[in-house]
Image: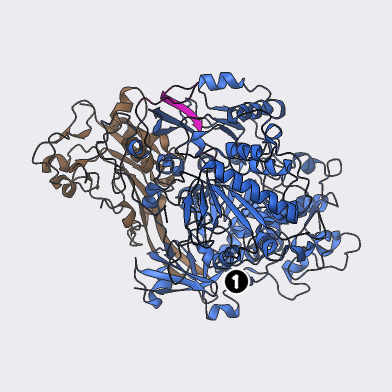
Amino acid sequence: MKPLDRRKFIKTSGLIGGSVSLVPGFAADLFGLTPGQAVIGDLPSEGWIRVGCPAHNCGGRCLLKVWVKDGLIARIETDDRPTDDLSDPQLRACVRGRAYRRRQYHPDRLRFPMKRVGKRGEGYFERISWTEALSLMAKKLTEIRNKYGNEALYIPYGTGSYSQTNGRWPAVRLLNILGGSLKYYNSYSWACISKATPTVFGTGITGNQRQDWLNSKFILMWGWNPAEMRDGTNTEYFLKKARERGARIVCIDPRKTMSAVALADEWIPIRPGTETAMMSAMAYVMIQENLIDREFIKTHCIGFDNSQMPDGYEEDESYSDYILGTIDNIPKTPEWAEAITGIPSETIARIARQYGSIKPAMLYQGYGMQRRAYGEQPVRGGCVLAAITGNIGIHGGWASGIAHQPGGTPFWNIFPMKKNPVKAAIPTFLWSEAVIRGTELSAKEGLSGVDQLSTNIKFIWAVASNALINQHSNINRTAKILEDESKVEFLVVQDQFLTPTGKFADLLLPACMQFETWGLEDGWKYGDEVILMPQVVKPAFESRSDYRICADLAREMGVYEEFTEELDERGWTKKLWNSYKSNRFPDIPDFEQVVKSNQGVYSLPVHEPKISFENFAKDPVKYPLKTPSGKIEIFSPALKELGQADEIPPIPKYIQEWESPFGPEKDRFPLQAIGPHYMGRVHSTFDNVDWLQEAFPQRIFINPIDAEPRGIKEGDNVVAFNDRGKLKLPCRFTQRILPGVVSIPQGAWWEPDKKQVDIGGSINVLTSEKWTPLAFGNAQHTIMVDIKRVR
Amino acid sequence: MSQYGFYIDSSCCSGCKTCQVACKDKNDLDQGMMWRRVYEVSGGSWEQRPNGGWNPQISTYNLSIACNHCEDPACVDACPTKALYKDSEKGFVLIDPEKCVGCRYCEWACPYGALQYNEDLGIMTKCDFCKDYLEVGNEPSCVSSCPLRAIDYGELSELQEKYGLVSQVHPMPDPKLTKPSLVIGPHRESETAKINKARIANLEEVKND
């Protein structure tokens, strides 16, 4: 039986817009709910309820107002708080949140537990009871734990449900109670920027609160696209306001993104992977024209030039040596950079002059450019530009780097997961290595906590994670690894849909939607707020909350009381709400009062935005950084000591990528392919939502300059391919991309045809599993492909 | 008579389509029906220099268009059953589903693509300005949805006073045709759009069928 084929939505017949009464419409008959069915104890059975928009890995944390009627969500509006000023702006949801009913009431939702029949990965399942499912899982977990130990257990990166009580947190807690599981560190989002920022500043808290952007006069949005990827609710709005206040905004990006169109005064297309070449040429111009802050460099930095090299490194190449070509005889001039970046030299020089002379200025780095072969370099390069122009620790400036907020750093997981008794941790991106050769891994592959693993990964419990297949690199390779039942011996997938990862499950557990349970979320990277997510409707079919599934499994494993502390989802939400009171928001109202008042959100207005490095900027001796030298390390002795200067230089350098338009690979695969975030999805979440497919269909975006010599016409079906795989999609012509680069937005669901051509359009059939040298991060944007027309 | 209209700030519209989908949610519109549509206008060319640098000459901007509740609505004129009419209170162009026979003449007549055919019901549908929301003091759903606060509404004369008189940018139809109750905050690149041969670049996303 193949129970879950794609079907069209139930039509919304009977409803004429405009005069519509608030009727649940398409959902009622499908979801088998009868009018008048009781909803939730302490919530009205009909009415508007304020609730946090289901938390995904979008960067937004927004407030919805949903109309509940007859046990269904019948309409979604957004934050309606009457004041909408910049100290505490409304948390307006984006297009994805507004389309949520089509996800919530999707006919493909997982309805029952199922177990695999047939080979792993074929996608054939049969329905089983919860009793059978939990007992099977407990049995396999116990067997594998007894045979290989807890290091064999793994809960992978997964962000499909991402509030404080949903998703993988409760699963991690349960396994920790049961002796732990193999840990991971860093992420698919920002491995390089997390690792590289502290090499310069000794911390990741390098940002200013967003209200401070209004003090800036010049903002370089470098590969930063908040309008599409939602880098914090309202980030694009703050930029709009900064521009209204007179900031000039320049966007550097291979694509003329939505952010470039809506927020910037100028767009500068750059060849992907060459950011550090442009940064170096900017430094060249600023040094030559004396547009740098020499006093700040002298007092706050090391390694800028020969006069300030750290002890023992006096003979090493300083930053100025590299920029001016003192040692390698290659001055990093704008002309040098033009041939690499594709940006005219005059443009590079002009931007350098603007960044060097307009004060204060921000250079904000996006994360796409650090998901590349040498993604550590542009991070360090951007930080250095901010430092040598003295834009650090001042209002309207910006230190660059990962830019966590001072004073209100996020509490992404306050759900208490307990201590993990397993010490070993792998870089997230190397999980497939830990499956095939875990016991051979060492510090060279980023293994930490232990010298060696005692076992390969044998048991995977993927909660809200489509990162095993769809979001990990080189899908065709990963699929082969997972198909082999002698490697991962048992694979549980707990999710809301049969994702491409789900197709590889031995056991499928249906998780409910976030509207169907309790949760809470906070302001992710920015905002100072807590958002309540009260349960508004019942779990559909036999689905259960992630927490409930874990609690039920805890009962099977004999640790129910320890796991639950006798709290249900609501109880945990209350407990976590109260913990915000003690650690961050002392004046937060009482939980029951918040539930009763239906206010949805508690926020702290920001009237005086905090900035990073304020004290350090004023007095670097009294307030040194946490770097080894206490100063900004333009030259990092610690990186030098790694002894891999070709790939991890102690000063930021442009390094030609391992797949590049300048390497021999260009002969067979002449186009760079990038996989940006797409407006219709959060990574792979929402890919199956029809209103979003309609608004943002999955396409290969190609410049006509590249299409026409290949005989491709607008709208043709084309295949993008390299040695790792093939995908087929219709193409869209666009002038909004640098020639030589094609865009295949990441996150579409892998759907191989009989010849293993992906007709779903997941760029990860083309990406490489090779990791970055310092951060062991994903370099998924560094790929070369070719494109041809097909019938 | 009062005449209501929309203001759209194309200068900062990102094309995110939150307005489009908020409208679909409010009005339960199936795939294919969009009472508000976001058009991407884009076009231009590239020149490469001998040293490899590229110079783009490109105009791009977005236009979020619903029904413009025109002062002189072509759809009303085209309707053979008088199902379409101009509301006397706020100047809304509305449709009486009882009278509509689904002949789709109005769809051909409207130069803005505002009229949307509902296949299941066999009749036309369109933006009604969320008049039910206005009656209880709320903003239209598209207005309150916009993450960039780029949509406004109100008495047309007041919008014009506040935001100016632009009601047409390339490649929109001549406003003389129907007198749309629309004010646009033009994107700076609309000035070069014609020279750059900008066109609707996302046609497959905005067409009705």
Q: In this figure, which colouring scheme has been used for the structure?
A: by chain
Magenta-colored stretch includes residue A449? no
Image x and y of residue A625, in percent: 81, 46
Magenta stretch: give its range: A36-56
Q: Residue at x 32, y 57 (%)?
A: B204
Task: Quadrant for the N terminus of chain B, please.
Answer: top left
Q: Quadrant of residue B179?
A: top left
Q: Which chain is brown?
A: B
Q: Which chain is blue?
A: A
Q: Answer left or right for A504 relative to B198.
A: right
In this orientation, does residue A497 appear? yes
Q: Answer left or right for A14 relative to A60.
A: left
In this orientation, does residue A388 appear? no
Q: Amino acid at mark 1?
A: Ile
Q: Residue at x 38, y 65 (%)?
A: A730
Q: Against A170, is A454 above or below?
A: below
Closer to us: B179 or A549: A549
Q: Considering the numbered disc 1 on the image, is that residue within a helix, a strand or a loop?
A: helix
How would you rate the neighbour count of disc 1 (Cα within 10 Å): few for under 14, some for 14-19, many for 20 or more? many
Magenta-colored stretch includes residue A55? yes
Q: Against A740, is A183 above or below?
A: above
Q: Residue at x 44, y 39 (%)?
A: A541
Image x and y of residue A439, in percent: 76, 63
Image x and y of residue B132, in percent: 30, 27
Closer to us: A358 or B90: B90
Q: Quadrant of residue A413?
A: top right
Secondary structure that dominates the magenta span: loop
Q: Chain of mark 1?
A: A
Q: Which residue is mark 1?
A: A340
Closer to us: A78 or A683: A683
